[in-house]
Image (cartoon, rainbow, N blue to C red):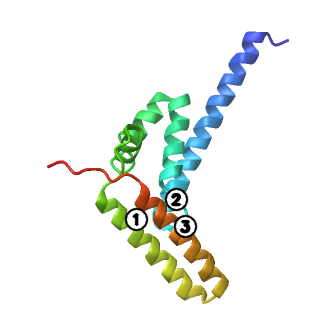
Amino acid sequence: MLTGLTCYNAHMKTKKLLLIVAGFTSLALGVVGIVLPLLPTTPFVLLSAACFSRCNKKLENWLLQSRVFGPFIENYRTGQGISKLHKIASVVFLWAGLISTMVITREVWIAVVLLIVGVGVTTHILLIKTKRSRD
């Protein structure tokens, strides 16, 4: 028979495992989002950081120390925003991917959906606070 403490420990281990799996899954989706313009990178990376922060400080620190993702997480947590260069690169890569998909598919309904999504994502990117450069 399981005692209350044993059940609690099992529940906590399961919760930690699920958070780790969710963290790595969202991180993988964020990495894929770097090359797929319709899959957003930042929300998945932020979700990954949130999952790791609740279950494993080593994984959280590993992600925060990442040269690629660490600065984005830190800038989000501190409310600094993203740099003008990153905004420009994001919009350019977004539209390059969208336009090439439109050209390849040559379907009007796909082009319309991609235009709507592109305008929405571009608007979101432009509305994010622009991080001031250090002079």
Q: Looking at the picture, how far across and down is residue 75, in whole percent? A: 36, 43
Return the residue at label 2. 40
Could you tell whether 27 is left or right of 108 in the image? left
Which residue is pictured at 63% across the width and 33% down the height? 17
- Secondary structure of the residue carrying tag 3 is loop
Disc number placed over residue 23 in the picture, else none = none
As measured in the structure, the alpha-carbon distance from the residue carrying label 1 to the one carrying label 3 is 11 Å
Q: Looking at the picture, how far across and down is residue 135, in whole percent? A: 14, 49
Q: Looking at the picture, how far across and down is residue 104, in whole percent? A: 56, 87
Return the residue at label 3. 38
Q: Looking at the picture, how far across and down is residue 46, in whole percent? A: 49, 45
Return the residue at label 1. 90
Could you tell whether 132 is left or right of 99 in the image? left
Up the image or down, 104 lies above or below 17; here it is below
Which residue is pictured at 61% across the width and 41% down the height? 21
First reached walking from the N terminus: tag 1 or tag 3: 3
As measured in the structure, the alpha-carbon distance from the residue carrying label 1 to the one carrying label 2 is 10 Å
Which amino acid lies under the numbered mark 2 shown in the image of this protein? Pro
Which amino acid lies under the numbered mark 3 shown in the image of this protein? Leu
Relative to the observer, which residue lies in front, 132 or 77?
132
